[in-house]
Image (spheres, rainbow, N blue to C red):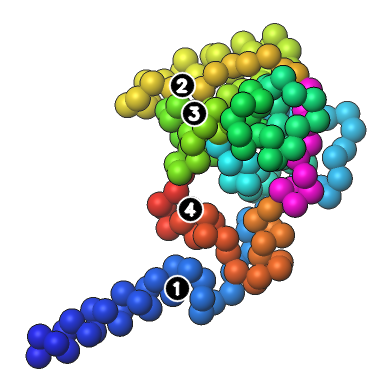
C-alpha cells in the first residue's frame, strides 16, 4: 500500500512539472494593451526604465493600456553602440532598459513609475533582479527632464512606506538610448510564436514565483 501511495505521489509530481514546463499545452497569448502599435509613433513622450532583464519588464508594459510602443535597449554606460555581449560583462556601466512610449491622455508618467515600482519588478533588490545579478540589472529610472525627475522622486518617497525594505532604485541622468539587438525586442512574444509555448520566465511569473 505504501509503495502505491509513493508511486501515485511521484506520478503526480512528474505530471505537474510537465504542465509547468508547458510540455502538454500550448501557450496562451500574452496580454497586450489596447493602444499598442507596431511602430514607434512620433510626438509622444517616452519613459526609460531599468529593472532587471529587459525581456521581463518590456512584457509587463506591453500589457498596459496607454502604452503605444516599447523597445529594449541599453543606457547609462560609457561605451558607444554597446552590444549585448558588452553589457553582460558588467564593465560598460550600462543597464538593460526599456523605452516605453505612451499616450499621456491615457496613462501618466506618474502611473508609469508607480507600475514600475509596484508591479514590473522588485525595487528593493540591489544590482540584481531574481537570478540575474550585476549592475546591468540594477533598478533605475532615467528621467528626460526636471519634471520627470521630480515626479519619480515623489513617487519613490510616497511608496517607500509600503515596502518592508528600502527602495534602492536610482535616478540617473538621461543619456543615449542604444537599441538592443532585434532578437531581444518583444522576446517573449517571438518565443511563443516560434515554439507555441510560454517561456519559462513567463510560466514562473504566472505561477507567482517570479517578480
Q: Which of the marked residues, 3 or 2, is nearer the chain's N terminus?
A: 3
Q: Which residue is mark 1?
A: 19
Q: CA distance from mark 1 to mark 2?
A: 36 Å
Q: Viewer-proximal residue, 108 or 73?
A: 73
Q: Are marks 1 and 2 in contact (CB under 8 Å)?
A: no
Relative side of 17 to 68, left or right: left
Q: Residues within 10 Å of mark 3 (few under 14, many from 20)?
A: many
Q: Residues within 10 Å of mark 4 (few under 14, many from 20)?
A: few
Q: Are marks 2 and 4 in contact (CB under 8 Å)?
A: no
Q: Are marks 3 and 4 in contact (CB under 8 Å)?
A: no
Q: Quadrant of residue 137?
A: top right
Direction left: furthest residue? 1
Q: Quadrant of residue 5?
A: bottom left
Q: What are the residue bounds of the magenta stretch?
A: 176-186
Q: Viewer-proximal residue, 89 or 10?
A: 89
The numbered dot on residue 205 is: 4
The numbered dot on residue 168 is: 2
Amino acid at each position: 500500500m505504501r509503495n502505491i501511495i509513493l508511486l501515485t505521489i511521484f506520478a503526480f509530481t512528474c505530471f505537474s512539472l510537465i504542465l509547468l514546463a508547458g510540455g502538454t499545452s500550448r501557450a496562451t497569448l500574452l496580454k497586450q494593451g489596447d493602444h499598442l502599435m507596431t511602430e514607434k509613433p512620433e510626438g509622444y513622450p517616452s519613459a526609460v526604465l531599468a529593472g532587471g532583464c529587459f525581456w521581463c519588464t518590456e512584457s509587463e508594459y506591453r500589457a498596459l493600456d496607454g502604452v503605444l510602443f516599447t523597445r529594449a535597449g541599453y543606457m547609462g554606460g560609457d561605451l558607444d553602440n554597446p552590444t549585448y555581449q558588452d553589457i553582460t560583462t558588467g564593465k560598460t556601466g550600462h543597464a538593460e532598459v526599456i523605452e516605453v512610449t505612451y499616450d499621456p491622455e491615457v496613462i501618466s508618467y506618474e502611473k508609469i513609475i508607480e507600475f514600475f515600482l509596484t508591479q514590473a519588478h522588485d525595487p528593493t533588490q540591489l544590482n540584481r533582479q531574481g537570478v540575474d545579478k550585476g549592475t546591468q540589472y540594477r533598478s533605475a529610472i532615467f528621467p528626460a527632464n526636471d519634471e520627470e525627475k521630480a515626479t519619480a522622486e515623489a513617487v519613490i518617497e510616497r511608496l517607500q512606506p509600503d515596502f518592508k525594505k528600502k527602495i534602492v532604485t536610482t535616478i540617473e541622468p538621461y543619456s543615449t538610448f542604444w537599441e538592443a539587438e532585434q532578437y531581444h525586442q518583444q522576446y517573449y512574444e517571438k518565443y511563443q510564436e516560434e515554439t507555441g509555448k510560454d517561456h519559462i520566465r513567463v510560466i514562473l511569473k504566472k505561477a507567482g514565483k517570479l517578480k
